[in-house]
Image: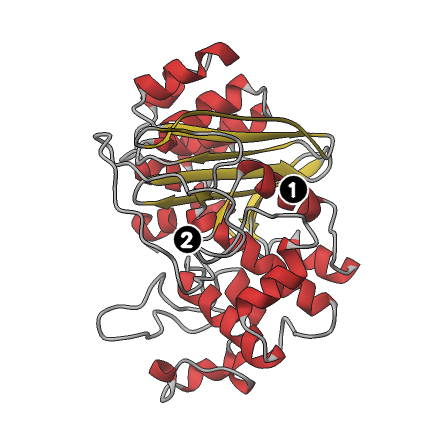
Amino acid sequence: MTNTAIRALTYATLIALAAGGGGGAAQAATGRTPSDIVRILREQRVESASIAVIRGGRIVRVQAWGTAGPGRAATVATPYNLASLTKPLTAEVILRLVSAGRLSLDEPLDRYWSDPDLARDPRRLTLTARMALSHRTGLPNWRGAHGLAFDHDPGTTTGYSGEGYQYAARYAERRTRQPFTALAGQWLFRPAHMRASGYVSAQGRTTAIAVPYDEAGRPLPVARVTRYNAADLAHATARDYARFLIDVRNDTGITASVAAARSASQADLTSNICTGTKARTCPPWTGFGLGWQLLGFPGGTTMLHTGKDAGAFTFAAIDRARGDGIVILTNSDNGWRVILPILAQTRSDPRLIAFLRGQMS
């Protein structure tokens, strides 16, 4: 596997990809106090950030700083584009349906849904929801101009794939005979009291979404999302996503067997990303669970995900044992630059900070 492919596999390393492999700017700002966050945003040319801090399984701090759009201040009620933080939401909907006996992690998806582009490829018959949620479908991240095709045989290798999540969501729709947005509302958003969250622009919106900004600080167009994407473009406030994160940590709505599968490594990444000097800051193991990258630190597992779209960078992590976590949402191409400073300022897990900094070195 090439280094480029390995980097594409790991959520944490998206920070390095966004930075072009450098981490100096982020590291230089780690000694700041809470009153300095506005200055950090200004220095790093990040228009706004919204955070929710979790301690012991409870939200203890929710704050927002900066500009959510021209002439509009960011507030704790401002929803942000979650980018790939959408994927854990989709995984959770599917896992709750599995726990309720409505879906299966391991039955062939082809019994209910097959993408027309794969109609002549017999490998589609082996695809499962477990493969999709752990990035082992063999499908690319997104289909190309000539449609969808396998990059690898399903189950044989690990490759980050938004298409895999779309495939699993369509399976859920066909299997339950309900639209995926309705399933998400019934099984996740309403039970978790995520009132400002949704997959499409009209669903659950309480205020205008944060406007994306490019590296130079120019506002980008805000496209109205009218069709759900199971891997991208959902929106939420930091508080809403923190509620979700707490439910995930507590295994709310899922059975013990499904919870065990979610928090177990389905695809090992240790040998790929914990190489050379990076091994010094890596946990004993890391891999993909179902919906999350897992960091196997001594004494407990941390669940991690990031997201990056044009004009957005997002981050979420929680320690399953201690119940300490954080959600960071930004509306800037430069958002990666404030992740480490905010983690340091909020006194987040030093092992997590060291791991991320090691991946950026």
Q: Can you say which quadrant of the picture contains the N terminus? A: bottom left
Foreground of the two, 296 or 195: 195
Q: Say which element carries label 1.
A: helix
Tag 2–tag 1 contact (CB < 8 Å):
no
Q: Say which element carries label 2.
A: loop
In the rendered image, which quarter is residue 177 located in?
Answer: bottom right
Residue beneath the point at 62% across and 37% down: 318
Query: In this image, 202 relative to 24: left or right?
Result: right
Please tell me which of labels 2 and 1 falls first in the chain.
2
Q: Where does the image place residue 320, in percent across and percent down from the top left?
A: 69, 40
Query: In this image, 216 relative to 223: left or right?
Result: left
Q: Is residue 156 above or below residue 121?
A: above
In the rendered image, which quarter is residue 159 located in?
Answer: bottom left
Residue beneath the point at 58% across and 75% down: 178
Mark 2 closeness class: few <14, some 14–19, many ≥20 residues within 10 Å: many
Q: Is residue 179 above or below residue 218?
A: below
Q: Residue lying furthest right in this view?
A: 256
Mark 1 — residue? Answer: 243
Separation of marks 2 and 1 at Cα, in angstroms: 19 Å
Q: Where does the image place residue 299, in percent across and percent down from the top left?
A: 72, 34
Q: Is residue 63 above or below residue 251?
A: above
Q: Where does the image place residue 112, in percent across and percent down from the top left?
A: 54, 84
Mark 2 — residue? Answer: 233
Asked if one can make out residue 295 in the rendered structure from this viewpoint, the answer is no
Asked if one can make out residue 173 in the rendered structure from this viewpoint, the answer is yes
Query: In this image, 285 relative to 32: left or right?
Result: right
Mark 1 closeness class: few <14, some 14–19, many ≥20 residues within 10 Å: many
Type of amino acid at the residue the image marks with label 2: Leu
